[in-house]
Image (spheres, rainbow, N blue to C red):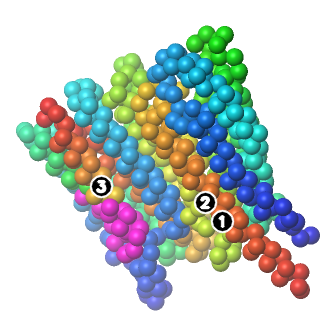
Amino acid sequence: MSDARRLAATGPWLALMAATLASFAAAEAVGAARLATSVVMLIASFKVRLVVMHFMEASWAAGPWRWALEAWIAAVTLLILGGYWLTPG
Amino acid sequence: MLARTDEITVTRRAALPGDPGVWVFILADMAAFALFFLLFTLGRIGAPDLFEHGRRTLNVGLGLANTLILLTSSWAMVQAVAAARVADRIRTVRFLWLTLAVGSGFAVSKIAEYAAKAQAGISMLTNDFYMYYFVLTGIHFFHFLIGCAAIAVTLTKARTQLIDGRFRVWIESVGCYWHMVDLLWIMLFPLLYLQRAA
Amino acid sequence: MPDDLRHVRFCAWNGMIFMFVFMVFWGMMGGNLPPWGGDQPASVIAHYFRANRDLVRTGMVVSMTFTVCYAVWGLAIGKVMRHAAGRESILVDLQVWGAGLTVVPVLVSSSFWLAGAYRPDTLPDAILQLLYDMAWLLIDLAYSVTSVQMIALGVGFLQDERHRPLMPKWVCWYSIWVGVMFVAECLMPFFKSGPFARQGILNFWIEFSIFFIYAPVVTWYLVKAIPRLEQEAAGAGAH
């Protein structure tokens, strides 16, 4: 089976693993909690998008399903980050 | 061979992989989890100190390991689907096994986490943070187990049935469900474990 | 032998009768929409029974009378599903039994509410609260009986080989999803407040809403399927 197809998933996988480690490092190391957490959540968002586009192959599709997935990612990121910034303390 | 690959490529352009109906299930589940994320977020706004205190007791290392495990398991699933698309039975079966084998690490880790909490006398009734922690990860774990069962069924089919169009729709559907389990954890991990109080 | 589709239409509409009765008589009159919280003191529940005894009695009497409509509906679904899943498929039986057995916890729990309204003045507050709790614990934790129906319905109709299936695939998957979602009711006995309690956003509002969407949707496609089956039978008969 074609190497191109195999690599098509491996590239995103490497990116996902790297992003995971990066966000972990950001969460633990960076001083300002608000900045660190925001970076972590945005990386998570980006990772979800990678899974949706490359593993679920939504990058091929147009139509309502694709937009529903994009909307979910945006909504969830907004609500978590928004809630985080609105938390007192 | 090349012509067939092209044909497969062309049909992929039109729609998402798998049975279109299964996307109802996937999106409904994702909507439910979005609601859970909202409930957690509201809970956290109401009791930031309690939630921070609880968060600090969570095993971030295991949470991180879980993320890496599910990502790798998802990768293996993609390979299995790709193999099914060229009707390579041996490769399909091999990667399905890998998906399960790697994925099982998640179960081991999760059970270890829960056991540690139980030993420390912590349960979902301890306080609101732990309520969300156990319920959210618990419901996710339930989804994970359903996914494992679906992959096991796929394995049986792959070993005994024709790797035809019908099987391809099935394995793509199961694959997308498994990727959903993966992406939900990708959000759950930072939500529960990494949101540091300011 | 051709399938007898007479009266199936009437039985199919029973699903809507059940839903309507349930919402109005069980829900509104019975004081269950939404339920009193697990964190409410007994005096609040007791007061509700004492102040609304006739309303609750009427609500429960009508509810109990029409609960059987759910089973009738399930049998109609079964008659149609045989043409999708195959006459001998166990999925047909699972759906029918799931629908039929769902009647039991609904009937029994309604009788507890009714008992609370029968002589609320002489019963102590704690007993009235107990009756209310028993009713809710039963109706919620009997979920798996209905889940069997819903999952069998979905899987059964997914076997349909027709180019345009009798029950659209999205309905089948939605049915399976609702059946699986019901599992969250397992959390309900552990919480008296919050989203997972009996009055909570998940275990009441979401769970009951997705159920109340499911029945009309299935009924709609069920009723549309019957003339299609009649046509198929007529076509087969002509040869």
> Nearest the camera: C36 or C200?
C36
The residue closer to the viewer here, C81 or A46, is C81
| Residue located beneath label 2 in the image | C217
Q: Of the residues shown, which amino acid type is indicated by label 3? A: Ala
Tell me where residue B66 sits by quadrant: top left
Q: Residues within 10 Å of mark 2 (few under 14, many from 20)?
A: some
Q: Who's the residue at 59% across and 54% down the image?
A: C214
Q: CA distance from mark 1 to mark 2?
A: 7 Å
Three-letter residue code for mark 2: Val
First to last magenta residue range: A46-71
Q: Quadrant of residue B82?
A: bottom left
- How many neighbours does mark 3 have within 10 angstroms: few (below 14), some (14-19), or many (20 or more)? few
Please, is residue A74 above or below residue C168 in the view? above
Task: Please say if C114 is above or below B28.
Answer: above
Whether pointer 3 and pointer 2 mark residues with C-beta atoms closer than 8 Å, the reply is no
Q: Mark 1: few, some, or many residues within 10 Å (few <14, many ≥20)?
A: some
Subunit of label 1: C
